Amino acid sequence: MIRTCLAMALTTTSALAAIPSALAVEPECHANDKYVVIGLEKSDDVGTDFLVRNKATPAMKVACKFKPTDGDFAVGGPDEPLWFEALEGDHLVLTRSTGPQGMLVVYNLAGRISVLDVDAEDVVVDPEGIAFWQPTGPGTAENCEQFAENEADGFGSVIQVSSRFSFTTDTVATGSETRCSITQ
């Protein structure tokens, strides 16, 4: 009986060891002429940690391995549910979210600094910048057509303004178009 249990335990351990490494989280890489961004989804939390590596030349090949080396710039960490959106020139565009509403986070990689961290929805990235909707205040019965419906369904309302972040100036310009959106 003891021999049978020991044989079963060894067989189970061997079988577990033989599970393919496809179950392990593999890094995801994004590159342009200046940088390689290596992202590794967190196994014990929500989001992704990122390493940013400078490229010496546009043609330089960098292994897609999440192993910090001298000169790397780390983005993310505990309690940072970050997700990759785009790499445009010197800008790394991320979202921070654990649900439907989230934040738009932009890093200027040349300066190694965060240049934008705002509530945002419907983010669209292009080579010149980012279009998004940014909240300006609560929705009310006076400024939101669907306010009563949202409230009846157990949701809130928020007024948002169309906005645009410029990669050239690292600034946000707000537009004149507004809308009322549902919130949790």
Image (cartoon, grey):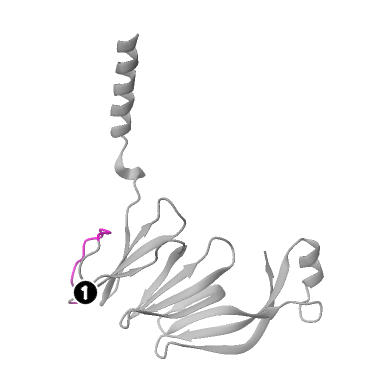
Q: What residue is at 49 percent from the left and 67 percent from the top? A: 96
**Vertical side of 139 occupied by 25: above or below:** above
Q: Residue at x 34, y 15 (%)?
A: 5
Mark 1 highlights which residue? 55
Percent across and percent down for residue 26 are: 32, 52
| Residue found at the very far top of the displayed protein | 1
In the image, residue 175 above or below residue 182: below
In the image, is residue 56 above or below residue 169?
above
Magenta stretch: includes residue 158: no
- Name the magenta segment's main secondary structure: loop
**Which residues lie in the magenta part?**
57-67
How many residues crowd mark 1 within 10 Å: few (<14), some (14–19), many (20+)? some
Query: Residue 160: x and y, percent?
Result: 64, 79
Tell me which amino acid carries mark 1: Lys
Most foreground residue, 31 or 160: 160
Magenta segment includes 63: yes
